[in-house]
Amino acid sequence: GAGVSQSPSNKVTEKGKDVELRCDPISGHTALYWYRQSLGQGLEFLIYFQGNSAPDKSGLPSDRFSAERTGGSVSTLTIQRTQQEDSAVYLCASSSSGATYNEQFFGPGTRLTVL
Amino acid sequence: GENVEQHPSTLSVQEGDSAVIKCTYSDSASNYFPWYKQELGKRPQLIIDIRSNVGEKKDQRIAVTLNKTAKHFSLHITETQPEDSAVYFCAASIPGSNTGKLIFGQGTTLQVKP
């Protein structure tokens, strides 16, 4: 079956521009997570969606970052006024529900480079 | 909040040797500890996990041990093969939320030399 997909795979932008990153979770998965992976670092939690509930935004590093999830499926992560320190790989993951023991399935990531 | 420390950051072994990666966590209420493997240029994939009510779990050449008292858990790979070369991440669940949110370690780059 289809796994988690993300687009674009690579994005190069200039400092100060806005970018949108897209995530298509596995069909039927109600939980969706965004992570950031900086060079040589672990995965940093950004935001979590569960069904139609209000998202958990506790990991967003600044108010320049926002995300939405439409119809409980596709999610978009938006970074406004990008900075060079935003350069990283942005990973999306989904799971069948938001329960603790459920496996998270990751997408291939979007590599963002801010010049 | 929960914090996860992972060591070593890099590990090089000869094919056939064993490899051990260790993680410590800060919140004793964490109850789920997965390990993910990320091959170069690919997405992270779950390879094994352990719940807090279990001390050890094995799956062929890989095993995970958990010491709740010391708040640390380890990944053991036996009879390593070149295809085991990858970055390995440990993670711990954030207690009390039942959201599946995980805190990840910094990763260990394992190189298996043929």
Image (cartoon, coloured by chain):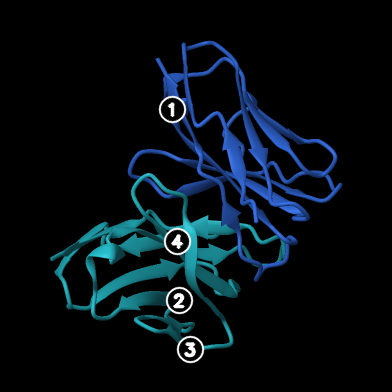
| C-alpha span from label 3 to label 4 | 18 Å
Where residue A60 sits: x, y (%)? 61, 37
- Residue for point 38% across, 46% down: A41
| The N terminus of chain A sits in image quarter | bottom right
Q: What residue type is labelled 2?
A: Lys
Q: For chain B, what colour was chosen?
A: cyan
- Dot 4 corresponds to which residue? B4
Query: Any mark on residue A87, and which?
Result: 1
| The C terminus of chain A sits in image quarter | top left
Say whether disc 3 or disc 4 marks the residue closer to the N-terminus: 4
Determine whether, in the image, residue B107 is placed left or right of residue B97: left
Determine whether, in the image, residue B62 is placed left or right of residue A13: left
Query: Any mark on residue B55, and which?
Result: 3
Q: Do labels 2 and 4 share a chain?
A: yes
Nearer to me, A10 or A20: A10
Q: Are marks 1 and 3 on the same chain?
A: no
| Residue B1 seen in this snapshot | no
Say whether disc 2 or disc 4 marks the residue closer to the N-terminus: 4
- Residue for point 71% across, 37% down: A75
| Residue A38 seen in this snapshot | yes
